Amino acid sequence: MKHLPNHILGRQAEELIGEGQTVKMRFTGASMLPYLRPGADTVLLAPAGGRELKAGMVVFFRYNDHYIVHRIVKRRGDELYIQGDGNLTQYEKIATDEVIAVVEGVIRPGGRETSPLSACARAYWAAWLALRPIRKYILAVYRRTSGRKYR
């Protein structure tokens, strides 16, 4: 499997999405742990144009010249506050029109596809949000027991 730098792969994905195509991309990076696992999960990116962007949705956007997949945690008018599930304090603040795509599906190892918009995924996010005071401990245990190295 060939790995491309974030700015090259992201730019290519943005062009295809701009043409109205849905793009499959292997997820990298640990910022969305435990929901998305780097190197194991694939995300399905669909054009965001015309969709109502709500808290809980996972989106693809460009921030400081990096392409990122994170979750909307809050919306105030046309401003979105976005954070990776594995991030404890850091978040990005962007305008709604800066969202390139919405993650419509996640393909797990073995080919099983799930939706981040399903009732189960929404329940996961609500529980994860409620666990904010102890998330760092949960993430530490997850990283140590998963058998994978995360940076």
Image: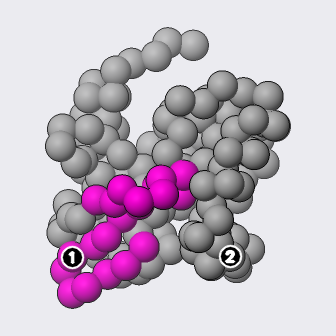
Which residue is label 2 attached to? 127
User: Residue 137 lies in what quarter of the image?
Assistant: bottom right
Q: Is residue 76 left or right of residue 121?
A: left
- Identified by mark 2, the residue type is Ala
Q: Nearer the viewer, mark 1 or mark 2?
A: 2
Image coords of residue 103 (percent x, y) = 49, 58
- Identified by mark 1, the residue type is Glu
Where does the magenta region start and end? 73-92
Q: Is residue 93 above or below residue 2?
A: below
**Is 75 covered by the magenta stretch?**
yes
Residue drawn 21% across the image and 76% down it: 79
Q: Residues within 10 Å of mark 2 (few under 14, many from 20)?
A: few
Element class at badge 1? strand
User: Residue 129 lies in what quarter of the image?
Assistant: bottom right
User: Residue 105 lies in what quarter of the image?
Assistant: bottom right
Residue drawn 64% across the image and 72% down it: 131
Image coords of residue 117 (percent x, y) = 59, 72
Residue drawn 48% across the image and 57% down it: 88
Image coords of residue 100 (percent x, y) = 28, 55
**Is 25 covered by the magenta stretch?**
no
